[in-house]
Amino acid sequence: MTNLPDAHTHPAPAAPGTAPRFICGTSPADWEQVALLAERDKNVTPFFGIHPWRLNPAAWKEEMRLLESFLKKFPRAGIGETGLDKCRRGIPGLPLQREALKQHLELAARLNRPAALHCCRAWGTLAGMLKEYPRLKAVLHGWTGALNPGAQLPSGNWLLSVGPREMDRPGLLSSIPLHRLALESDEHPEALPELYRNAAQALSMKEEELAALVADNMERISAR
């Protein structure tokens, strides 16, 4: 099966299709490329943000002003990929990451835009921050089951997005409410068909049924 919804991916050569795709930029270096893909394909929802790996202590505040100009130009755009990361070495520490993420979340709340969120070994901190934004629409990318989403996340429109790496976690898919489920390729769109096959089998669903479910979930949190 081809032409599958993708809840989190990045700029890469891909054939146009009718399935929705959330394509995320990670810094000003790739925002123009994301914007071009969205202009060429109405099924692409662009996301613009500063990833913690790309967080420049000397430049990020100015980049946030540029981010707002991209969001005004693309009223359907989301915010991200952004988030928190305690795994990667050589990047700014959590205090600066928190400050940058807070500005992203404030912007998402003010403009009513969905956010694409990355997290590595900082889920408790992220959950605490998200409680300040109960109406935020968000895709929690690379979901590992690190939290109890019903108890630790706000009750807004968030999705838990699973990619090929997370599929190896026993019972992960079945633990996600279907109205919260999304599937993603991250940086490997060629992996989507196998991902959908495996996920459909794990959930005892038809691939077409699963693809329609993910597309509906993505539509529900998209900017209006």
Image (cartoon, helix red, strand yellow):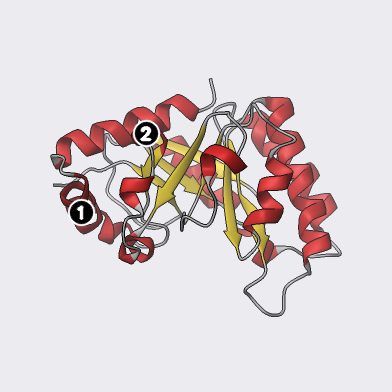
Residue 51 visible in the picture: no
- Residue of label 1: 193
Element at label 2: loop
At which x and y percent is residue 126?
Answer: 67, 51
Give the x, y percent position of residue 173: 32, 50
Q: Earlier in the sequence, mark 2 or mark 1?
A: 2
**What residue is shown with label 2?**
43
The answer to whether 192 appears left or right of 47 in the picture is: left
| Amino acid residing under circle 2 | Asn
Q: Residues within 10 Å of mark 2 (few under 14, many from 20)?
A: some
Q: Residue at x 28, y 32 (%)?
A: 213
- Identified at 56% across, 52% down, the residue is 25
Q: Residues within 10 Å of mark 1 (few under 14, many from 20)?
A: some
Residue 10, image x, y percentages: 46, 55
Instruction: Name, please, the residue furthest toward the top.
Output: 224
- Separation of disc 2 and disc 1 at Cα? 18 Å
Say if 101 sits above or below 208 in the image. below
Res. 163 image quadrant: bottom left
Q: Nearest the camera: 18 or 91?
A: 91
Front one among 119 and 112: 119
Q: Residue at x 58, y 55 (%)?
A: 118
Q: Residue 87: give x, y in percent of width and height.
A: 62, 73
Identify the secondary structure beneath mark 1: helix
Label tally:
2
Mark linked to residue 153: none
Type of amino acid at the residue the image marks with label 1: Pro
- Give the answer, above or below, for where 139 lies relative to 209: below
Q: Measuring 25% from the left and 56% from the top, which residue is drawn there? A: 195
113 up-or-down from 186: above or below: above
In the image, taking residue 47 as reference, residue 190 lies left or right, namely left
> Between tags 2 and 1, which lies in front?
1
